[in-house]
Amino acid sequence: MALSFHYKGKLKNAPSLPFLVEELEDICHVFDWKIKVYNNIFPKNTFADPVNDENYGIMFTPPSSDPVSFVFDSEGRVIQPWLRDILKKTQDGEIKVITIQLNVDDASSDPIVSEQNEAFDPASILYSVHVKMPSSSAEIYVKVVELLRYLSQKYLEDFTIKDETNYWGSGDVTILKDDSTAINVIVERFQELLGREPIKDPKDFIRLLKKLNREIKRESDKPDKKSEE
């Protein structure tokens, strides 16, 4: 089962962009996640209307995951930057849909391929970010979703998310995979640390992540009692 969610939103205010970019750079450095930084400040620290062709913000990619976008257009709306280039070439409001049908019960049959043009609303895909990763990446999924929860509350408005796993709404890690022991340890330890050390600024959040990683590593380095027996 793939783990996936979709989200959309808007930056609360233009001057906060460099702080968001800097904070995400630090967090991704802790996790060793790949990042791509676009313009990290809006001209004159204000949104621009009408929309121009520039991208602002940062995108990060955890292992085995689709990119997670905190990239914005000049009006401050979250976008998928790679889709922007594609949609620029599709000005007629149509997209080609290719359907492939394959009979899995007949190994000798050829696939049936059909093509057709369908009308679509570019905004429905440009301003909705889709992130998917394999079920084996459940621990990373929890980290990404909790990071998204934190950053959306701090920096975004008009934020909505549809979590196909329902982890966002329930906080129940058992729905992500059957063996959820490692994820439970992360969540419980993270909540425990939050209770003892409230986050007051970005430095506190970075310090908390580093401490969480150290404690989890200490637990994983301990000898397995079952193996000793």
Image (spheres, rainbow, N blue to C red):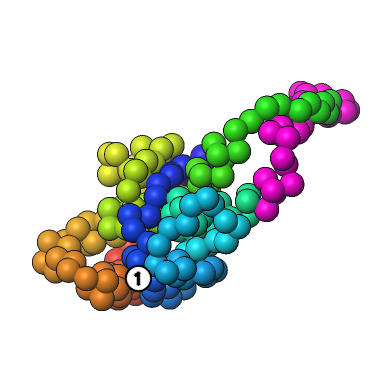
Question: Residue at left 43%, top 44%?
Answer: 7
Name the residue beneath numbered marker 1.
Answer: 19
Considering depth in this image, is 224 or 20 the residue closer to the camera?
A: 20
- The location of residue 216, given as percent across then percent down, is 30, 69
Residue lying farthest to the left in this orientation? 196
Question: Residue at left 12%, top 61%?
Answer: 195
Mark 1 residue type: Phe
Considering depth in this image, is 73 or 229 the residue closer to the camera?
A: 73
- The location of residue 166, given as percent across then percent down, is 36, 37
In the displayed structure, would residue 3 be above or below residue 150?
Answer: above
The answer to whether residue 109 is magenta is: yes
Question: Residue at left 64%, top 30%?
Answer: 120
Q: How many marks?
A: 1
Residue 223 visible in the shown view:
no
**Label 1 crowd bin: few (<14), some (14–19), many (20+), radius 10 Å:** some
Quadrant in which the C terminus appears: bottom left
In the displayed structure, would residue 161 be above or below residue 219?
Answer: above
In the displayed structure, would residue 106 be above or below residue 148?
Answer: above
Question: Residue at left 60%, top 38%?
Answer: 122
The answer to whether residue 175 is magenta is: no
Lateral position of residue 224 relative to residue 41, left or right: left
User: Looking at the rendering, which quadrant does residue 223 occupy?
Assistant: bottom left
Residue 13 visible in the shown view:
yes
- The location of residue 119, given as percent across then percent down, is 68, 27
- The location of residue 14, given as percent across then percent down, is 38, 62
User: Looking at the rendering, which quadrant does residue 100 occupy?
Assistant: top right
Lateral position of residue 229 relative to residue 50, left or right: left
Lateral position of residue 212 relative to residue 126, left or right: left
Q: Secondary structure at mark 1?
A: helix
Q: Which residues are magenta?
A: 85-111
